[in-house]
Image (cartoon, helix red, strand yellow):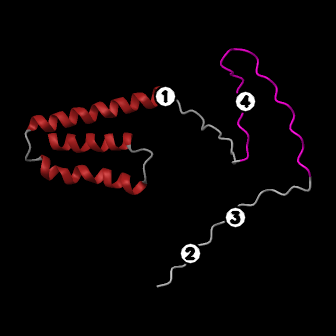
Amino acid sequence: MLLVVYVVSQMASTLIIAATTDKTQRILFMLMPLVFVFIIARLPAGLVLYWVTTNLWTVGQGLITRRLVQKAPAPTVEKRSSRTPPKDDGSSGNGAQPETPAPQPAPSTSQRPRQVRRKKKRTSRR
């Protein structure tokens, strides 16, 4: 009977913990307790009871955490390139108002963007 409780508690614990894992990995996690039954059957009952209580504690903790913690919306990340200037967050250490930067002169139309040159691969001759 204790082995059945162990298998059920381990599978429930796996369902709670591995909710966001890969499908194949979840299936393996669900089959592992069935494989472990043959090993656990020879262990002392106190050790199996310890594992069962740990599994049940994990299931309870996971259920409570899921109910209390609401999913926050995914943060939107601004795409930046190497040419994007850093944002001024208005914090300048001394509490003073941030200075407004001098306006940058507009680039002339005759200037082309700088091109990156790639290194040529050396071919080794033997």
Spatial CA distance of label 3 from label 1 is 51 Å
Q: Name the residue that disc number 4 marks.
A: 88
Q: Residues within 10 Å of mark 1 (few under 14, many from 20)?
A: few
Residues drawn in magenta: 83-108
Q: Nearer the viewer, residue 19 or 126?
A: 126
Q: Name the residue that disc number 2 marks.
A: 122
Q: Amino acid at mark 3?
A: Arg
Tell me where residue 105 appears, x and y as whole percent.
89, 40
Under tag 4, what secondary structure? loop
Does the magenta stretch mainly form a helix, a strand or a loop?
loop
Spatial CA distance of label 2 from label 4 is 44 Å
Q: Point out the tag, 2 or 1, that comes first from the N-terminus.
A: 1
State how many labels appear. 4
Q: Amino acid at mark 2?
A: Arg
Residue 51 covered by magenta stretch: no
Q: Residues within 10 Å of mark 4 (few under 14, many from 20)?
A: few
Q: Point out the tag, 3 or 4, that comes first from the N-terminus.
A: 4
Q: Quadrant of residue 116?
A: bottom right
